[in-house]
Image: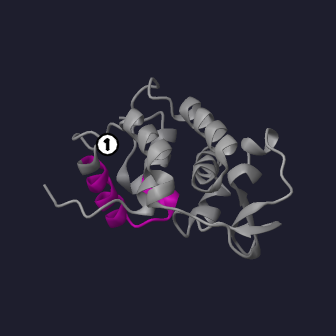
Amino acid sequence: MKKHNGMRPHDIVILLKIATKTEPWLMKNLASELKISASEISESINRSVIAGLIGSDKRTLNRLALLDFLQSGLRYVYPQQPGALVRGIVTAHSAPPLNREIMSEENFVWPYAKGETRGQAIEPLHPKIPEVCLGDNELYELLALTDSLRVGKAREQKRAFEILKEKIGYARKASN
């Protein structure tokens, strides 16, 4: 087995995309849907197997381990500080589903030229996220909730994790 040189930010994107799947998935489909090369998808899956986030069969998502990592490690491994005011696509507490529960004067956005909202810039876990999420609402919500874990205050983090737990649900049928 290959040496593990640490997870990369886009590994989280790939794992969350797998978490949305109810049918068996193929690496080439993940590559197409996420606009990430097939070789990067393959390397990411290998890193996730070594980390225990995907089973040794390279098919079964370890939902409990993913949730544990998101809750306990994400903000330390991929920290983020809101940046300059830019045009983009809302994320974190500014995006669904948290924007229905948490009212705030400040918007957080992924910088994106075609975005319709001005807010403080949050660097996405992968540069293609804004473009990909325009056509994938389920992944968009998971990534926005993930950003709430990265940049939110305690209340936002707590609520974001509760919703992630419902959406990812380790009791949910494992992805094959």
x 78%, y 45%: residue = 99
| 118 with respect to 83 (left or right) | right
Q: Which residue is mark 1?
A: 54
Query: Secondary structure under badge 1?
Result: loop
Name the image colouring.
Answer: one colour
Residue 85: x %, y % from top left: 77, 74
* Residue 94 visible in image: yes
Question: As rendered, which of 47 and 128 lies closer to the eye?
Answer: 47
Position of the N terminus, as image quadrant, is: bottom left
| 32 with respect to 42 (left or right) | right
Label 1 Cα crowd, 10 Å radius (few <14 / some 14-19 / many 20+): many
| 117 with respect to 125 (left or right) | right
x 66%, y 52%: residue = 152
| 143 with respect to 18 (left or right) | right
**Amino acid at circle 1:** Ile
* Residue 31 visible in image: no
Position of the C terminus, as image quadrant, is: top left
Q: Is residue 32 magenta?
A: yes
Residue 143: x %, y % from top left: 59, 51
Label tally: 1
Residue 100: x %, y % from top left: 81, 40
Q: Please give the range of residues in magenta.
A: 30-49
Which residue sits furthest right? 105
Which residue sits furthest top? 171
Q: Is residue 159 above or below residue 89?
A: above
Q: Is residue 4 magenta?
A: no
Question: As rendered, which of 32 and 152 lies closer to the eye?
Answer: 152
x 57%, y 55%: residue = 150
Which residue sits furthest front? 154
